[in-house]
Image: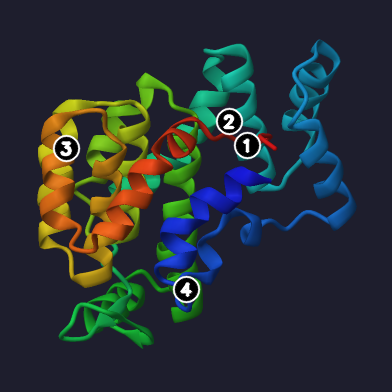
Amino acid sequence: MRWITVAALSVCGTLAGAAAGICPAGAQTSPAPAREDLSELLKRRDPPAIAELERRFTAIADKNDKQKIAVVLLSRRQGDQPYFDFLAGYARQAVLSDAPFPYRYDAAGKLVPGDLSPPFVAWAKAHKLDLETAVRRVFQEYPTDVFFLSLASDPRATEILLKGLESPNYMVIARAAFGLARLQYTPAIRSIAAAAEHAPGELSLLIARNLALFDDAAAQAAAERLIKDKQILAALREHAHQELTMNIGDS
């Protein structure tokens, strides 16, 4: 499924070790055969497939599978409120969380996998969460929830995504910026650039890369300023259309 491959580039490629669990494919819990059947069904656009997806959305319990179905049904049917509400509910929890970014980063701004920051440890303790659960929730689940809402490319998500730019979690900021880029919501450009400027090293790049997806001169100028590696910038621009149009079920 190309949508996983391309979308994963920003997280699973840039933060390879620590972010391995962020990819939605790795967060699924459904048995393999059901997952394979669903992946084929998500590619179809015929009425029987849509009807079966609607049935499965109601019947299944797996959160990520329901999120995938909701994204596809929104794109196929363009406006069903229950599916938007399902995606928005989880994304709203993510952007409203006060959880700090879990990991330390070195003087060069490179994330140090496994080295948790004291503020995050304190946050987990205050919320009575063991560290493994806390890291999974903040570093994996929250960004993934915002990612699914971003994939819906639904203007109703704008307010939630803008709130995501204020998150203390850099991964949530990056996913919110991605969603705003897919919407081509140009009023967010300045805030995305500011968030990238205040993020350390590779996390700055993870946020700034979304500026290259805007068809806007100010966004492109900010991308030029913030992305020092011009080969990376050129690649982002080359593949911008793919990132802006990819969706679940694409082959």
Q: Nearer the viewer, mark 2 or mark 4?
A: 4
Amino acid carrying mark 2 in the image: Val
Residue at the (15%, 53%) spot, across then down = 195
Count neighbours of disc 4 (C-alpha within 10 A) and say few if under 14, some if 14 to 19, many if 20 or more.
Answer: some
In space, the residues marked 2 and 4 are separated at their CA atoms by: 26 Å
List the residue tagged with mark 1: 248
Circle on res. 16: 4
Q: Nearer the viewer, mark 3 or mark 1?
A: 3
Closer to the chain start, of discs 2 and 1, is 2
Closer to the chain start, of discs 2 and 4, is 4
Residue at the (56%, 14%) spot, across then down = 80
Amino acid carrying mark 3 in the image: Ala
**In the image, residue 46 lies at what x, y percent?**
80, 14
Q: On the image, which quarter does residue 226 sit in? A: bottom left
In space, the residues marked 2 and 3 are separated at their CA atoms by: 27 Å
Residue 137 in view here: no
Q: Is residue 243 left or right of residue 37?
A: left
Count neighbours of disc 2 (C-alpha within 10 A) and say few if under 14, some if 14 to 19, many if 20 or more.
Answer: many
